[in-house]
Every structure is written in structure tokens, then in C-alpha cells.
Amino acid sequence: MSPTVGLLNYGNSGNTYNVQKALELAGGRVTMIQNKADLDLVDRIVLPGVGCFKDAMNNLAPIRDELICHIRRKPTLGICLGMQILSKIGYEYGETPGLNFIDAEVKKMEVKGKVPHLGWGTLSMIRDSPILDGITEKDNFYFMHSYEVINYTDVIALTDYCNHKFVSVVQKGDIYGVQFHPEKSRTAGIKILINFLNL
């Protein structure tokens, strides 16, 4: 039976519909997480991401503690902003505590190029991970972000933008984060979601 994926709806993620469709294409059964009780109904959790770190954490406040408990027990994937809020702290519009699963800070990208970073990029693999099974350094992924995760211990892959290498994939146990949007990354993105469902 296909795993049931809880897709978190925290109010400011404009790509929830696209993520749902991509997860279904990858073979998942998707349940929208609207409240604490919904978390008990799912095998896996996906934190989608378009929006602001501070707004996301404020919107998650009613279910934050319950969400943390479930993330500790279930495979979880953070996408873009969803990856960023897995960090210890974010500095978008002030200083905001994150979910504190990844020992990392989220800061604005400092590059000699346009920010937000919009467009396609490849992954430079740092170490093996089941989330990247079958993915090569020739595969392209779509990025759309102004902030980046600063982490040194849980890095799976880096991506180069204007001669600046930023963290594009992280893993800590069964918790994964991708800075790109798999739902916008065509075949390679669907492969990432299939790998997540197969964990």
C-alpha cells in the first residue's frame, strides 16, 4: 500500500497544490495537515515552502509541539522554506526560532548576483543519501529563494550560484531538506519524491 503523506498547510505556502500533485504522481496518498489530530493519520510528513520564515513559524505555533513529536518519529521532508524552518534559527525579518532539528542558521544569500536566486542548478554530492538515489550531478533542479541554510554537519549536497556554494540538501536521520522545488523540477524532482516515499 502507498504511504500516506501529511502535507502541512501552514497558511503561507503558495505551492501546496503543486506539491500535492507531484507527491501523488510519485505514488503517495496525500492528506492535508490542518490540525494536531491530522498528524496521527499519516506515515510521513512534508513541509512545503514558499514564504517567510517568521510567518511560517507563527502559523505553526498552534501545532508546533505536536509537529515536533511527529517529526521525531516519522520520515520528514522539508522543501525550500520547509527545509529552512528545520533549522535552529532564522533571520528573515528579525530573529525567529525554528523547529531546531538541524544545527543551522538561515541567513540572506550574499552573492555577486541577483537575489532571489531563481532558476536551475545541479547538485554537488557531499555524501550518499537515500533521498538522492539515482540522482546524478547532471540532473537539474529548480531553485527560488533569497535565504540559505548555513550548516556544516548535515550537508548532503551543495549547489553553486554566482561562485557561491550553498547548502541544497541536508539529512539528519530520517529528516531531509531540499532547498530546491522538486514539484517544479520535472523528472528529477519526481525521483526525489519517489525516494522519499520509499524510505
Image (cartoon, rainbow, N blue to C red):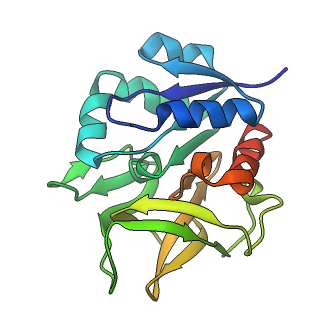
- Residue 187 visible from this viewpoint: yes
Q: In the shown orientation, is residue 161 left or right of residue 145? A: right
Identify the residue at image location x=35%, y=54%.
88
- Residue 74 visible from this viewpoint: no
Q: Quadrant of residue 5?
A: top right
Q: Position of residue 138 (x, y in %)?
A: 74, 74
Q: Most extreme residue toward the top, as rendered?
A: 37
Total number of numbered discs in the rendering: 0
Q: Position of residue 85 (x, y in %)?
A: 38, 47
Q: Position of residue 79 (x, y in %)?
A: 51, 48
Between 88 and 23, the residue placed more toward the observer is 23
Between 81 and 22, the residue placed more toward the observer is 22
Quadrant (top left/top right/bottom left/bottom right) for the C terminus: top right
Is residue 167 depicted above or below 89 in this figure? below
Q: Most extreme residue toward the left, as rendered?
A: 94
Q: In the shown orientation, is residue 10 left or right of residue 171? A: left
Is residue 163 depicted above or below 180 in this figure? below
Quadrant (top left/top right/bottom left/bottom right) for the N terminus: top right
Identify the residue at image location x=14%, y=55%.
94
Between 57 and 48, the residue placed more toward the observer is 48
Q: Quadrant of residue 164?
A: bottom left
Q: Position of residue 80 (x, y in %)?
A: 46, 52
Identify the residue at image location x=53%, y=58%.
180
Q: Quadrant of residue 105?
A: bottom left
Identify the residue at image location x=77%, y=54%.
130
